[in-house]
Each structure stands twice: as structure tokens, then as C-alpha cells.
Image: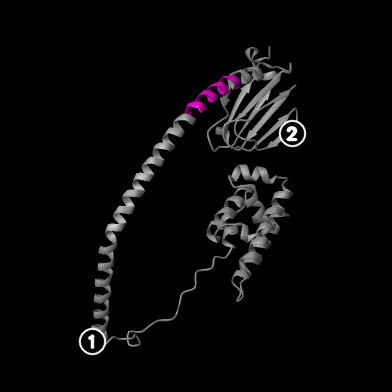
Amino acid sequence: MTKNLLFLFLKTTKQKLHSQEPEPPQKKLAEIGAQLRQYREQNSISLDKVAVVTMIRRNILQAIEEGQLDQLPEPVYTQGLIKRYAEAMGLDGTQFAYFLPIKAPPRSSTKLSWENRPQLRPMHLYLFYTFLIICSVNGLSQLMASSGTVKNRAATEEIALGQQEQARLLAEASTASKNQTTDSYEAVEAARTGQKSLDKSGGKPVMVSVTWKAESWMQVEVDGKIEFEGILPIGTVRTWQADRKLVVLAGNAGGIMIALNNGQAELLGAPGVPKEAVFQADELKPSEKPK
């Protein structure tokens, strides 16, 4: 049923593109977005998962589905986004991208022939050169007269700037010394707090501590129930526990650090690559069991 609807959409769109009055890009984008959204919802695929697979922001995908042309980049780039979206759904991305028209910039048909161009006579050229010489002499004399004043002013400003720079360097040195002492104290406290948080155990077979090192969308499923889905600020540490199974799905595996049952924290995967990790209680080694 879905393949028949897509075939009918492609056939109707081709007929409209070859008609004498092509539809505006806004309307074409709305038709394409409606077809992609209908196919996605029929297959029960969330927009967040499409964003993870295609590496396209969720608001851009939503603008494509709703036909919001003003929220998208140039049509040639929008075609590429539509192609990636359609291919992620298992469709022919090239065909979908082809249906979004790209208007070529209008070319001016007005040509100025050599015969119609105004021509200067020798007398006009003589007057023009005379005027140009007079203006050059006057400008040169004014420049020489004001050069002395400009030099004196530049020297005064250079001395003032040097004094301001010395004062700024002294202030920055004092501030840096204070900040270094404060940062050292905060680093020690943060290390102590982090160690205490990792030492806590809820007694369940599976416990995973997640630390955000870079921006990444993530979904956490605990014993078959989704407990978290979204993006948290860099540096955030969250812990989840499960009795049987805990599943972690990240859009940027290189931005997520995971520690299993108070163990050593490790990167989930390579930067910019989505990855899913599954932790089951019956598959853990004895050394990985919580103490």
C-alpha cells in the first residue's frame, strides 16, 4: 500500500514538473514533506531517531515535513537534506530531491551596443585632464600640510596606548594568579565529589554512570522502559540502575563516557558516530558485579 502511494506521488509530481505552470517551491516542499512524514509514521519511526541516523538537526527535519521553506537553507542544499532523509527511510532519495525545483538566477537581456555608448571628444578629454591635475595638486598640498599634525597626534596616541597596555597586563596577571588558586581548590573538590558519587551503589545487578564530554543526544532504556531521552549540558553525570537489562543509545558515541558498576569510565565509541550499548545482568562477569 505504501509503495503504491509513493509511486502515485512520483508520477503526479513528474507530470506537474513538465506542465506549463510549475508549482512554487513552497508547495512542492509541503508535498514532499507530507509524503516523508506519512511514510515515517506508518513505520513507527520517531523524528529523533531519524535525526541520529541522518545527522540532521531535528528542527530542520521538522521544517521539511511542514514545508517551511523560510526555515531551510538554499534550495540546492535543501535537496541534499531531502535526499538523506528519504534514503534513511529506505526510499529513492534522488527522486525525492529532484522534485524540489531550483530556480536559476534571471539573466539580464539588456545589451549596450558599442555604437550607442557615449563617446568623449578631444576637447572633453582636455578639460577632464586639467580638472584632474588641479584636484591632485590641491590634495597633495593639503596632505603635506597636515602630515606634521598627524605625526604628532599618532605619537601621543601611541604613548597613551602603551600605558593602557601595561595597566591591562598587570591586571590580567593579578586575576590569573587568583583564578589559578581558585581552580586548584575546585578541581580537588570536584575529584572528591566525583569519587563519592561513583562509590555509591544501589545494590542492583546493573548500574551505569554516564558523563557528557561533548554534545550528544542519548536515550536510556531500563528493564524495557525508556527512562531518559534528550541532550544534557557538557560535564553532566547521570546514573541509572536495572535489575535485568539496561540499553544506552547515543547519537555521538565519542561524546559519552560510560562506567559500568563503579568500573573505569570509557568512551562509548568514535566521535560523530551513533552507537547502542546493551548491558544485561546475566552476561556480566563476576568482577563486574556490584560490591
Residue 108, horizontal then vertical, whole percent:
45, 77
- Residue at 61%, 72% in the rendered image: 22
Residue 132, horizontal then vertical, whole percent:
27, 76
- Residue at 61%, 75% in the rendered image: 21
Q: From the image, which quarter does the N terminus lie in?
A: bottom right
Residue 208, horizontal then vertical, whole percent:
66, 24
In screen coordinates, is 210 left or right of 165? right
Residue 187: in magenta span: yes
Residue bounds of the magenta highlight: 176-189
Q: Look at label 2 and name its amino acid.
A: Ile
Classify 132 as above or below 197: below
> In which quarter of the view is residue 80 placed?
bottom right
Residue placed most toward the observer, 147 or 194: 147
Classify 170 as above or below 205: below
Q: Which residue is mark 1?
A: 122
Give the class, few, some or many, for how many residues have Cα within 10 Å of label 1's Cα (few <14, many ≥20): few
Residue placed most toward the observer, 158 or 276: 158
Residue placed most toward the observer, 87 or 160: 160
Q: Does the image show residue 261? A: no
Q: Which residue is mark 2?
A: 226
Residue 271: in magenta span: no
**Secondary structure mostly taken by the magenta-highlighted segment of the chain:** helix
Q: From the image, which quarter does the C terminus lie in?
A: top right
Q: How is the image coloured?
A: one colour
Residue 13, horizontal then vertical, whole percent:
64, 66
Q: Secondary structure at mark 1?
A: helix
Give the class, few, some or many, for how many residues have Cα within 10 Å of label 2's Cα (few <14, many ≥20): few
